[in-house]
Image (tube, rainbow, N blue to C red):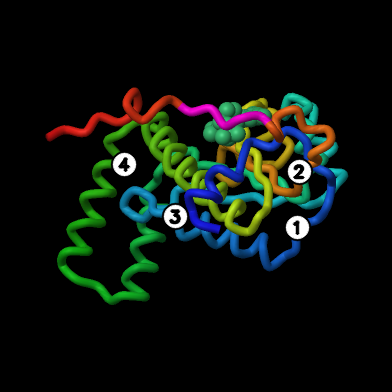
Amino acid sequence: MELSDILLWRYATKAMNGQKVNSDKIERILDAIRYAPTSNGLQPFEIIVISNNELREKLQPVINNQQVVTGSSHLIIFAAWDNVTPERVNRVFDQVVAERGNSQGLVDYRQFLLMKHTEQTTDDNFNHAARQAYIGLGFGLIAAANEMVDATPMEGFDPLAVDKELGLPAKGLRSVAMMAVGYRDAENDWLVNLKKVRRPVADFVTVLK
Ligand SMILES: Cc1cc2nc3c(=O)[nH]c(=O)nc-3n(C[C@H](O)[C@H](O)[C@H](O)COP(=O)(O)O)c2cc1C
């Protein structure tokens, strides 16, 4: 399928049938998320993948009881850094130096970012990290559709409760979004046959000449 067809095929699936997605497909979806671009290449978020049924059942109440939490094959949680600390910035730059070699440009760039994220508030740093996580979510949604795997992006959950259940505060992480992946339950999904609705191009795109 062409990308344009894939984008029309995917939809925010409301009911999944419990069928498991094979591990090769899951790996490719996770790789697409890992290869998503992020501001300054910091990748300031992590991914938590839950296929365990009991854990997903336990989490479902704090994810607004959404059916896809348990109907899916895997639940992928996007957890942003709670702050962009010097340790985190240095770790990324140390890896770049190890893999590409150092340069004066890189030394200056590291200092600039260390300064920038120290001057910004923790909230600003977290919000910046969360925006990068959403880029990963977008890549993940397209990658899933490319595998003909259904996916539901989700913000409808109680982040504090999810964080507590998964022990995220101890890791300096905060959940910001989720993606359930699996296969549609066409008989029980009210959305499956509805037309995809989008604002018309003329109302959405301004072309400046
Ligand atoms: C960040 C984000 C959060 C969303 N949260 C939920 C959610 O919690 N539950 C849900 O069923 N759909 C959720 N959606 C799905 C949207 O409602 C859906 O993507 C939108 O209506 C467009 O429809 P489509 O994805 O089927 O094309 C979310 C989508 C995004 C991008």
Label 2 crowding class (10 Å Cα cut-off): few <14, some 14-19, many 20+?
A: many
Q: Which residue is mark 2?
A: 184
How far from the left and from the top, in percent, is residue 204? Answer: 34, 27
Location of the N terminus by quadrant is bottom right
Looking at numbered disc 4 in the image, what kind of residue is underneath it?
Answer: His
Between disc 2 and disc 4, the foreground one is: 2
The Cα atoms of the two marked residues, 1 and 4, are separated by: 39 Å
Q: Which residue is mark 3?
A: 36
The Cα atoms of the two marked residues, 2 and 4, are separated by: 42 Å
Q: Which residue is mark 1?
A: 21
If you read the primary sequence from the N terminus, does the residue marked by circle 4 or circle 3 appear first?
3
In the picture provided, is 63 more to the left or to the right than 42?
Answer: right
The Cα atoms of the two marked residues, 2 and 1, are separated by: 12 Å
Q: Which residue is mark 4?
A: 117
Label 4 crowding class (10 Å Cα cut-off): few <14, some 14-19, many 20+?
A: some
Question: Considering the numbered disc 3 on the image, is that residue within a helix, a strand or a loop?
Answer: loop
How far from the left and from the top, in percent, is residue 172? Answer: 54, 43
In the picture provided, is 209 more to the left or to the right than 67?
Answer: left
From this view, report whether residue 198 is shown above or below residue 93.
Answer: above
Location of the C terminus by quadrant is top left
Looking at numbered disc 3 in the image, what kind of residue is underneath it?
Answer: Ala
The Cα atoms of the two marked residues, 1 and 3, are separated by: 22 Å
If you read the primary sequence from the N terminus, does the residue marked by circle 1 or circle 4 appear first?
1
